[in-house]
Amino acid sequence: MQKYFEILRKCPLFFHIEDENLIAILSCLGVKVKSYKKRETVMSEGDPARSFGIVLSGSVQIVRMDYFGNRSILSGASPSELFGESFACAGTNELPVSVIASENCEIMFVECFRVLCSCSNACSFHRQMIYNLMKDVATKNIMFHQKIEVTSKRSTREKLLTYLMIEAKKNDSRSFNIPYDRQELADYLEVDRSGLSAEISKMRDEGIIESQKNHFELLNV
């Protein structure tokens, strides 16, 4: 497990936990590491929501499919980030979403009850880990509300501009990369891809934005 320490030190779950305690806590949690190929399903809708994942390498996307097979990207996770923890902590019987590998990845799985219930050794750092997990869940709740703010807009242009302004603020710059290609961006915004591409072209022509693949720059907003 020590080969993953550089990533785990950056993981919100293990903030303020020393390396010597990290070794003990990984043993206490009984974590498992699995590898997935790009587009492989990491977690499926309907699976029991008992565990959450930590991305060690690569990345994943959390997606929801409606009755007609339309895909909506809810969020993503990159190295050191968690996913599925909100559902596991809530005690949800079945996952309402799926998690898909957006590139080849390694995932560390943690059973939620092992985090929330202190072990028999009553490790002093276990309390810190519980605090870290609750803080991460609260942060993800804020991100979920940002997603609602974006998708609640009426037009494709309004959705796109709202999303781009959130990303600009996050990056503290008018020029930034987003983690999605065109189809993925359409799925995140919950709009038609061709309509999105047409709107991006119009906004470029109007001098509102510049864009190249997944790079955007806000010009006149």
Image (tube, helix red, strand yellow):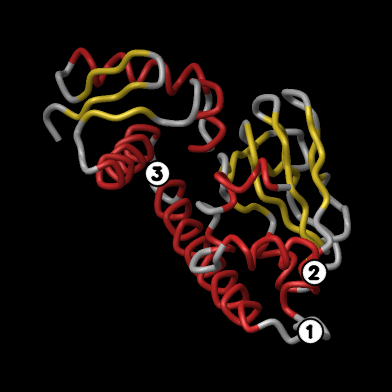
Query: Of the residues under marks 3 and 2, which one precedes in the sequence?
Result: 2
Say few, some or many: other residues with alpha carbon within 10 Å of mark 3 (under 14 / 14 to 19 / 20 or more): few
- In the image, which disc is placed on residue 51? none
Q: In front: 125, or 212?
A: 125
Nearest to the eye among marks 3 and 2: give it. 2
Nearest to the eye among marks 1 and 3: give it. 1
Instruction: Kindly identify which residue carries mark 2.
Output: 28
Answer whether labels 2 and 1 touch (C-beta < 8 Å).
Answer: yes
Counting from the top left corner in percent of width and height, residue 184 is at 55, 27
> Is 13 on the left or on the right of 117, as rendered?
left
Q: Quadrant of residue 219?
A: top left
In the structure shown, which secondary structural element does the residue marked by tag 2 occupy? Answer: helix
Query: Of the residues under marks 1 and 3, which one precedes in the sequence?
Result: 1
Three-letter amino acid code at the position of disc 2: Cys
Q: Quadrant of residue 58?
A: top right
The quadrant of the image that shows the C terminus is: top left
Say few, some or many: other residues with alpha carbon within 10 Å of mark 2 (under 14 / 14 to 19 / 20 or more): some
In the structure shown, which secondary structural element does the residue marked by tag 3 occupy? Answer: loop
- In the image, which disc is placed on residue 154? 3
Tell me the residue at 55%/45% (across/down): 6
Instruction: Kindly identify which residue carries mark 1.
Output: 121
Answer whether labels 3 and 2 touch (C-beta < 8 Å).
Answer: no
Disc 3/disc 2 C-alpha distance (Å): 48 Å
The answer to whether residue 41 is above or below residue 148 is above
Disc 1/disc 3 C-alpha distance (Å): 54 Å
Counting from the top left corner in percent of width and height, residue 136 is at 53, 65
Counting from the top left corner in percent of width and height, residue 13 is at 59, 63
User: Disc count in the image?
Assistant: 3
